[in-house]
Image (tube, grey):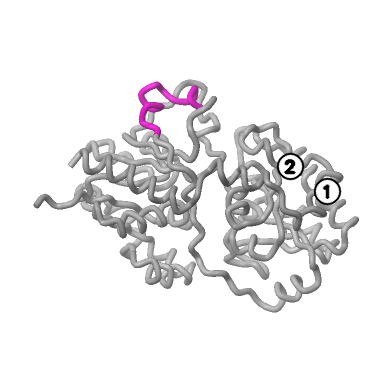
């Protein structure tokens, strides 16, 4: 009997884990292909909840050093029949792009999995012309619409729709008394996200100033409303560091989700969602994270079509109206979840699509 084809994946950090591990674990349990994942050993030290997850899910990636992940990758890639990635080798701008360069050099098949609801190179333009992907299979969360124009016809033909696959499988986090005391003080709690890391003109200084002016007004007018402010992945950047500091000095009802400091250090987006009743966010994957957690979400008004059916927050009145209605069920949230599919079905669909492609090649 011929040996089953081998799929390789690299878990460099939490974005790779969150996006690909649920699919890899599903593939492993289905048993039609062999699955091998390498996880950066530093990530295991930073996020202690990963090892128990691997034991519970029955699929354990192999710890790998920085040297093996970034430089000594050739043998692992050669031994695999395909590589699952969240960065196409033609368009990888990370420090791991040399792996993609090597894959192209030896012609190693690549399978691309969408990892962002609003993602450059998927439904946001990266270049003026059409994009050609190296990957011979593209797994997207939604069917192509206007974004078809972003790709060459050959690339668009490689797209398969599997639905939203970013399943939250980490156990709930435990924080110290500062967080529990804050939760006890504020019976209504709202998470507000920002993504001011974006370049390419999506956000300007005026956008940042407007965001923090709006939050200042909301915190002042609603002293009984606890607000958590979270930047993209909790990273603090020069463009908003001073704004954060000013709000923290002025308002006791604000809490910041900063990854490397503060009472919510090391918190994921789901850890922050666990502490609140609803969320306002830019057009981002965080919207789906919140809705699939069973809580309502609104988006800041950015004139983007992706979540046009959700409440669009452009001023204080809209902000306060959403905060007041957080605990009231609304069918619009069910309709968005229906659009992106049931997670369990989506994971099976993604696994089956990968299996078909790999077994056909084998």
Which quadrant is the C terminus positioned in?
Answer: top left
Q: Main secondary structure of the magenta part?
A: helix
Residue 351 position, x and y percent, is 35, 48
> Is 141 on the left-hand or right-hand side of 286?
left
**Which label number is shown at residue 311?**
2
Viewer-side residue, 249 vs 309 = 309
Tell me, yes or no, whether the highlighted magenta stretch contains residue 84.
Answer: no
Residue 251 position, x and y percent, is 84, 62
Residue 312 position, x and y percent, is 74, 40
Q: Quick one: SS at disc 1?
A: helix
Q: Quick one: SS at disc 2?
A: loop
> Is 304 on the left-hand or right-hand side of 121?
right
The residue sitting at 76% across, 55% down in the picture is: 328
Q: Give the range drawn in magenta.
A: 147-159
The residue sitting at 45% across, 22% down in the picture is: 130
Precedes in sequence: disc 1 or disc 2:
2
As drawn, 360 above or below 11:
above
Callouts 1 and 2 close, C-beta under 8 Å: yes
> Is 298 on the left-hand or right-hand side of 105?
right
Viewer-side residue, 269 vs 289 = 289
Q: Distance between the residues labelled 1 and 2?
A: 10 Å
**Disc 1: which residue:** 321
Residue 137 position, x and y percent, is 34, 36
Estimate how packed mark 1 is, as few (under 14), some (14 to 19) or many (20 or more) residues with alpha carbons within 10 Å. Answer: few
Estimate how packed mark 2 is, as few (under 14), some (14 to 19) or many (20 or more) residues with alpha carbons within 10 Å. Answer: some
């Amino acid at each position: 009997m011929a040996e089953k084809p081998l799929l390789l994946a690299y878990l460099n950090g939490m974005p790779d884990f969150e996006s690909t591990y649920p699919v890899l674990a599903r593939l492993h349990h289905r048993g039609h292909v062999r699955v091998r994942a390498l996880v950066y050993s530093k990530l295991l030290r930073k996020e202690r909840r990963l090892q128990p997850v691997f034991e519970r899910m029955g699929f354990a990636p192999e710890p790998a050093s920085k040297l093996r992940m970034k430089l000594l990758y050739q043998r692992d890639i050669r031994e695999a029949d395909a590589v699952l990635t969240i960065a196409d080798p033609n368009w990888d701008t990370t420090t791991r792009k040399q792996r993609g360069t090597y894959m192209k050099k030896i012609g190693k098949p690549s399978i691309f999995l969408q990892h962002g609801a609003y993602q450059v190179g998927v439904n946001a333009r990266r270049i003026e012309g059409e994009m050609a992907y190296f990957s011979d299979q593209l797994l997207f969360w939604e069917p192509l619409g206007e974004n078809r124009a972003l790709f060459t016809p050959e690339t668009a033909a490689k797209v398969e729709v599997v639905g939203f696959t970013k399943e939250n499988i980490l156990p709930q986090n435990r924080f110290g008394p500062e967080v529990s005391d804050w939760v006890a003080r504020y019976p209504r709690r709202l998470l507000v996200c920002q993504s001011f890391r974006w370049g390419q003109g999506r956000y300007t200084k005026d956008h940042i100033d407007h965001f923090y002016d709006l939050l200042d007004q909301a915190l002042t007018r609603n002293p009984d409303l606890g607000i958590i402010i979270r930047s993209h992945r909790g990273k603090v950047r020069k463009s908003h560091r001073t704004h954060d500091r000013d709000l923290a000095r002025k308002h006791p009802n604000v809490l910041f989700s900063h990854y490397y400091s503060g009472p919510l250090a090391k918190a994921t987006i789901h850890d922050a969602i666990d502490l609140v009743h609803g969320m306002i966010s830019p057009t981002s994957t965080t919207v789906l994270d919140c809705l699939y957690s069973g809580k309502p979400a609104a988006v800041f008004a950015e004139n983007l079509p992706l979540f046009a059916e959700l409440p669009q927050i452009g001023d204080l009145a809209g902000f306060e109206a959403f905060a007041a209605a957080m605990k009231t069920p609304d069918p619009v949230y069910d309709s968005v979840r229906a659009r992106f599919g049931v997670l369990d079905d989506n994971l099976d669909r993604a696994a089956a699509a990968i299996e078909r492609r790999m077994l056909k090649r084998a």
